[in-house]
Image (cartoon, grey):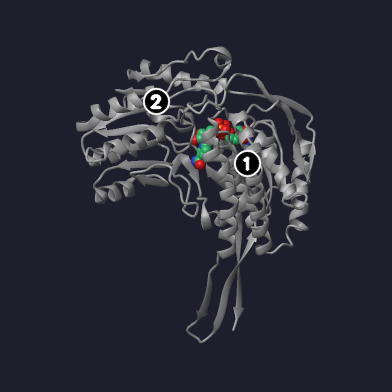
Amino acid sequence: MTAPPHSLRNFVNGAFIDGAASFEKVSPVDGRLVATVHEADGEVVDRAVAAARQAHNGPWGRLNTAQRAAFLRRVADRIEERFEDLLVAEVADTGKPTALARELDVARAAANFRAFADVISTAGLDSYLTELPGGQRALNYALRKPLGVVAVIVPWNLPLLLLSWKVAPALACGNTVVVKPSEETPSSATLLAEIMNEAGAPAGVYNLVHGFGPGSAGELLTTHSDVDGITFTGESATGSAIMRAAAPRVRPVSFELGGKNAAVVFADADLERAVDGLERSVFTNTGQVCLCTERVYIERSVFHEVTAELVQRARSLRLGHPDDPATTTGPLISVKHREKVLSYYRLATEEGATCLVGGEVPALGGDLDRGAWVEPTLWSGADADSRVVREEIFGPAAALIPFDSEDEAVRLANDTTYGLAAAVWTRDLERGHRVAGRMRVGMSWINTWYLRDLRSPFGGVGMSGIGREGGEHSLHFYSEPTNVCVAL
Ligand code: NAD
């Protein structure tokens, strides 16, 4: 299922257009060329924002909620019709196992559009009957208005899933969008542009600019004077830069940022279930999911048992070509990202941790040795202050750390500047609820991981983000309520 290299262009006002320069996107599997990508310069970004503004003031702005919901459902249908094209694109860019992309990425994109068609169709707003002591009465009700033109900037780890998670609610609320996918994953966002046309989007509703962050399309978009809001998923440091870019014009931002997520395993847990969950939460997508676990706190009485089993699981992962059904684990996104991950692998042992498994670049042979492969890795003995315990690695690696009491587990798990997600493994549900509630995070799981209801709030505290998306929570960012007060 290897697509031939092709040329990916920007999409502005319903048509594909060239950029002033281009860059090459290569496969993390074997380094082969995937696509030549047209990079948007200032002129292309200006045209994209102007097209979005025009569509917002024009045909798109005139649609009612039911018409927008119907459009989102057509996009979902079309995503399903072009499922295989999107799958090939996603796998070509990321190198992730095809089976994983089929289950995790593409299916969720269609689900995202349907979910927000439902949310916007049923969402209400406040109304109050006001009665003052003197007898005066009034009816207050709120109208939901779109922000206008929304810039959507997304990372490479779950490209289409995260893009559609933002585009769907933005359009549902009546905004138009200019999206900038990661330079590492330009393909599925480009196919989504075709799908928008096929689903009958008015020109300018969905615009796409390709490029990098600083000094390129990302910065041009976040500093643009006619963008009304910025929704961003990516690294915390990038979020900080985007916040500064948004500050002069006081534009709203929604941030889904990095994490250093903890799992806590109590001795009374169903240990087999916990280990199954930990294998997924540490190694899924080669550890490149913002929700992945990088710190595993294990009650001391079962520390050796759980550690030995997890090491076995790490050894049994199969690194290989995305199309091989035996493959469980793909490469990292790029050789550059591998440098970062390997620097943490070196640091862990320099800082005194013991590498229990992995820690190296695997020799897979043939073309794969030109890819961005790295071994799944576990450490014990890492100090609470060491950098591998404090900083996000975003690779298939975790530190395993013993604890002696519930309070100590909570204190260690919360000892981080991040605060995205946590997982608690225990058969004592009273304790499960108590510990989940004490976690300083946006999302806690008890005896599971990654299970999502698209209506529930998604986001993080601290360095992990600002705001919540998901269900009606997304509407809070992508629309502004306007109150109308009528004297009765
Ligand atoms: P990144 O921050 O490097 O890049 C994300 C996007 O921002 C890319 O499109 C990039 O080109 C753009 N960008 C970079 N600098 C910019 C700037 N100065 N101005 C405007 N745009 C800029 O992140 P990444 O490496 O692509 O993704 C990995 C990170 O994303 C990890 O930290 C991970 O935890 C995080 N993430 C978070 C969530 C979540 O929901 N909280 C989900 C997925 C990934």
Q: How many marks?
A: 2
Mark 1 and mark 2 residues within 8 Å of each other at the beta carbon: no
Q: Residue 189: in sight, yes or no?
A: yes
Which residue in the rendered view is the most extreme toward the front? 325
Is the CB atom of the residue marked by disc 1 within 8 angstroms of ligand 1's nearest atom? no
Q: Residue at x 46, y 39 (%)?
A: 463
Numbered label attached to residue 218 = none
Q: Quadrant location of the N terminus?
A: top right
Q: What's under tag 1, amino acid-wise?
A: Phe
**Which SS class for mark 2?**
helix
Count residues near mark 1 (Cα–Cα under 10 Å), then give few for <14, some for 14-19, many for 20+.
some
**Foreground: 365 or 418?**
365
Disc 1 is placed on an element classified as helix
Of badges 1 and 2, the one in the foreground is: 1
Q: Quadrant of the C terminus?
A: bottom right
Residue at the image point whose x is 52% and y is 50% from the top: 469
Quadrant of the displayed image that contains ligand 1: top right
Image quadrant assignment for residue 391: top left
Q: Position of residue 445 (x, y in %)?
A: 37, 45
Q: Where residue 130 appears, x then y in whole percent? A: 51, 78
Q: Which mark is residue 83?
A: 1
Instruction: Tell me, yes or no, if residue 225 can be seen here.
Output: no
Horizontal and vertical percent position of residue 201: 74, 52
As displayed, is residue 244 above or below residue 25? below
Front one among 374 and 173: 374
Which residue is disc 2 drawn over? 388
- Sequence-wise first label, 1 or 2: 1
Spatial CA span between label 1 and label 2: 38 Å
Q: Position of residue 199 (x, y in %)?
A: 72, 51
